[in-house]
Image (cartoon, rainbow, N blue to C red):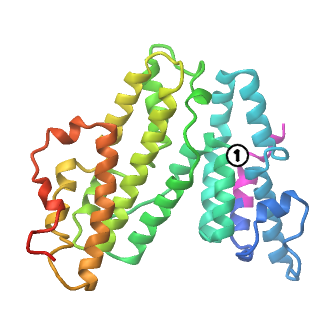
Amino acid sequence: LMVNLLTGEILNNLAKLSRWAPTIDTNTDPVKDLIEGKSIFEGLIDPMESACTEARRLLFILLADAKSSPFLHHLQHLKNIDPNKCIEQAGLFLPQLGMTLHSMMIGQGYNFPMRMFLNRCLNTTPELVPHFFKTLQLKDPKPNYRTISSLSFIEGILREAPALNHRTHLGKIFSAGEARDTISTRWALSSIIPPCVTKLILAKVVQSPSALLVSSGLKLLATILRRTRECTLTWAVTSVPGNNGACNELFQEVLHHLPDVPLLLSIPSRFDPYKSTDCDASSNANAIVMIHLCETIQFIVNLDPVSVMNIKFDWVKFLPNESTP
């Protein structure tokens, strides 16, 4: 009853109102203080400010407090009783919870307290991860602050989001006529790569002449591949039949969303850290690009060595010339 009552306009209005609440002190953990009964909203005089702060307080409880939130309590109850019913009913409110969480992040900013709040929400309810990912945005990349900050923001979310739990989400949630591997791969992919991170956008990023933009893109690529490895390692220790097929299919799907390996290997020709004997800004920036590139290539090699072995490339380009001191 409470879930039906709060879903819809009420949750939307709370999210809109909370965006006008005062910025939280960066030295506090708002969720922890709230759950422990501490007041972090003292000193508010303006009625509008108080209403906005109260709306944010309610959203903290609804999104992050598993004991008090009717949404999270209902979800846990369904998971314990009937996984099929859990997936069906959770689909009615999890997308809105994801949009509400994104609205709060936009209104309050990605400061330390809100980052802790986001991490708590996603770790408390891992099922929320793909729904929150759908709300993220990444427009046509350009070598400016907006693009670089967006890449860093998404990379930070992917890096700190909870690891995938294969056992929790498989069970009996497969539709009739669809293969187990297909369903699990589809779910895993939605929890690894946000829809806004496309192959075209990433290809434009790594082809940019800006060392800062390229290094930000490579860092995001490495984080995506790291999440893929975490997923495959989780599947490897389960007893679910067909794990190997699911792991291979997942990695191939991830590769389809990333720039081609030959495109990544063209980066050293544009960002050679050994071209200058002086420790100038350009050589330092190029060195950072190469560090992130090596990390990305290493993840690809660990996940699928064949995808790199079949490529003709002069790997000596990763080493300094003989004339370089």
On the image, the x and y values in percent for residue 94 come to 64, 42
- Disc 1 crowd, CA 10 A, few/some/many (<14, 14-19, 20+): some
Three-letter amino acid code of the residue under disc 1: Thr
48 and 200: which is toward the camera: 200
On the image, the x and y values in percent for residue 175 come to 52, 19
Q: Is mark 1 on a helix, strand or loop?
A: helix
On the image, the x and y values in percent for residue 141 come to 32, 66
| Segment colored magenta | 1-14
Q: Mark 1 points at which residue?
A: 124
Residue 196 at least partly seen: no
On the image, the x and y values in percent for residue 65 come to 79, 50
Q: The C terminus lies in which quarter of the figure? A: bottom left
Q: Please report the residue visible at 62 percent of the width from the left and 29 percent of the height from the top.
A: 168
Q: Is residue 152 left or right of residue 89?
A: left
Q: Is residue 41 left or right of residue 276?
A: right
Residue 71 at least partly seen: yes
Q: Please report the residue visible at 88 percent of the width from the left and 83 percent of the height from the top.
A: 45
129 and 100: which is toward the camera: 129
Q: The N terminus lies in which quarter of the figure? A: top right
Q: Please report the residue visible at 57 percent of the width from the left and 50 percent of the height from the top.
A: 161
